[in-house]
């Protein structure tokens, strides 16, 4: 299961600062470079890397922005430690991610469809914040929290796969999904 998770993580990538992007595989970096060249963006750089081992020197990044990638990593603690390492003193972290208000049933946590749908890798909201703080960030706060409307579950392809794979009634999944929220989180490296 962990290799499958890592494969999913490599299929996603996080934006690092305003001018650097860590890519998940060579074709991703190639495409990004082509797009930058086509758009005549000379102030960008693309690096092949993993979110748990950023290909960036210590204390060199002003801002890290991540959009729904960290929940795919099996080592969230390492992700936040890496973010802290590469940020300059006073650097900022802004994350949007999926978290839980209560634990998911084990069947969904172990479901490949759940990982593909960015749900199975999510952790409890309070634990997510703790991991950021434990990495050393200060002023950590949730700036926005959004619940997903239950009607989205009916139309979501990952939800449909979970229903089919686990033979789960739609009403049960809707109830479970009420504990899944999207948050935006801010944090700052001291200095």
Image (cartoon, helix red, strand yellow):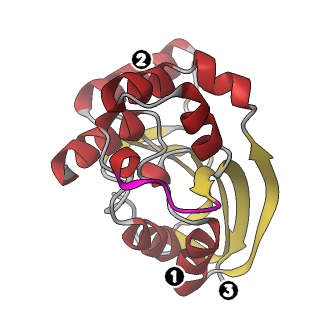
Image point (43%, 26%), residue name: 163
| Residue 153 image position (x, y, % from top left) | 61, 26
Tell me how far mark 1 sits from mark 3, CA to CA.
11 Å
Whether residue 24 can be seen here: no
Q: CA gap, disc 3 to disc 2?
A: 36 Å
User: Where are the magenta residues, as a range?
Assistant: 101-106
Q: Looking at the image, do the residues carrying marks 1 and 3 touch, with CB atoms under 8 Å apart?
A: no
* C-alpha distance separating marks 2 and 1: 35 Å
Which residue does the numbered mark 1 point to in the structure image? Answer: 135
- Which residue is nearer to you in this view: 138 or 26? 138
Viewer-nearest of discs 3 and 2: 3
Q: Nearer the viewer, mark 2 or mark 1?
A: 1
- From the image, tell me which residue sits under label 3: 190
User: On the rendered structure, is 63 left or right of 82?
Assistant: right
* Residue 41 screen position, x and y as percent: 58, 26
Q: Quadrant of the C terminus?
A: bottom right
Q: Is residue 134 above or below residue 164?
A: below
Residue farthest top in this picture: 38
The tally of labels here is 3
**Secondary structure under the numbered disc 1 in the rendered image:** loop
185 versus 13 height, above or below? below
Magenta stretch: includes residue 16: no
Q: Residue at x 55, y 31 (%)?
A: 42
The image quarter containing residue 173 is: top right
Discs 3, 2 touching: Cβ within 8 Å: no
Q: Secondary structure at mark 3?
A: loop
The foreground one among 109 and 15 is: 109
What crowding class fits label 1: few (fewer than 14 Cα within 10 Å), some (14-19), or many (20 or more)? some
Residue 34's label in the rendered image is 2
């Amino acid at each position: 299961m962990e290799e499958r998770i890592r494969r999913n993580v490599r299929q996603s990538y996080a934006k690092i600062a305003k001018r650097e992007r860590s890519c998940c595989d060579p074709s991703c970096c190639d495409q990004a470079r082509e797009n930058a060249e086509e758009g005549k963006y000379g102030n960008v750089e693309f690096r092949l890397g993993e979110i748990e081992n950023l290909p960036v020197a210590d204390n060199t990044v002003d801002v890290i922005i991540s959009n729904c990638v960290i929940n795919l990593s099996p080592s969230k603690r390492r992700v936040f430690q890496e973010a802290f390492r590469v940020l300059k003193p006073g650097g900022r972290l802004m994350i949007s991610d999926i978290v839980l208000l209560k634990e998911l049933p084990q069947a969904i946590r172990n479901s490949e469809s759940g990982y593909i749908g960015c749900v199975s890798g999510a952790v409890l909201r309070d634990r997510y914040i703790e991991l950021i703080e434990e990495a050393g960030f200060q002023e950590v706060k949730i700036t926005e929290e959004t619940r997903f409307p239950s009607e989205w579950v009916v139309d979501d392809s990952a939800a449909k796969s979970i229903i089919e794979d686990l033979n789960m009634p739609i009403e049960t999944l809707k109830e479970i999904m009420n504990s899944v929220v999207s948050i935006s989180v801010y944090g700052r490296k001291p200095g």
